[in-house]
Image: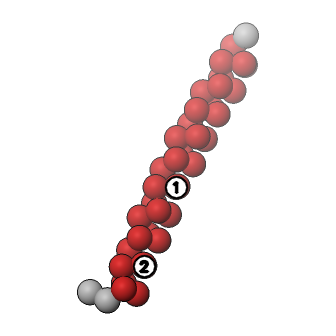
């Protein structure tokens, strides 16, 4: 494996991680909105 593919894999991993964080952030935001709607 050369360094180019390692960089690519690292980029993919960090992208997937940020996507997961973004998804959980959106989920928390929607939960917060539901709480506000109920009150």
Residue 29 to residue 39: above or below: below
The one of 33 and 4 positioned closer to us in this rendering: 4
The quarter of the rendered structure image containing the C terminus is top right
Seen at 36% across and 79% down, the residue is 6
Q: Toward the viewer: 1 or 30?
A: 1
Q: In this rendering, is residue 13 above or below 19? A: below
Residue in the image at 50% along x and 63% along y: 15
Residue that lies at the very extreme toward the top in this rendered image? 39
- Nearest the eye: 32 or 8: 8
Residue drawn at x 58%, y 40% is 25
Name the residue tied to disc 2: 8
Looking at the image, which is closer to me, 5 or 31?
Answer: 5
- Residue positioned 72% across, 19% down in the render: 37
Quadrant the N terminus occupies: bottom left
Structural crowding at the residue carrying mark 1, measured as other residues with C-alpha within 10 Å and reported as few (<14), some (14–19) or many (≥20): few
Q: In this view, does 37 lie above or below 2?
A: above
Which quadrant would residue 4 be assigned to in this image? Answer: bottom left
Q: Which mark is residue 19?
A: 1
* Rendering colour mode: secondary structure
- Percent across and percent down for residue 27 are 56, 37
Left/right placement of residue 16 relative to residue 27 reads: left
Establish if 36 lies above or below 29: above
Q: Do the residues labelled 1 and 2 touch (CB within 8 Å)?
A: no
Q: In terms of secondary structure, where does tag 1 sit?
A: helix
Tell me where residue 29 appears, x and y as whole percent: 64, 34
């Amino acid at each position: 494996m050369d360094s180019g593919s390692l960089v690519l894999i690292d980029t993919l991993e960090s992208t997937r991680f940020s996507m997961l964080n973004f998804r959980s952030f959106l989920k928390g935001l929607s939960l917060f909105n539901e709480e506000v709607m109920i009150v």
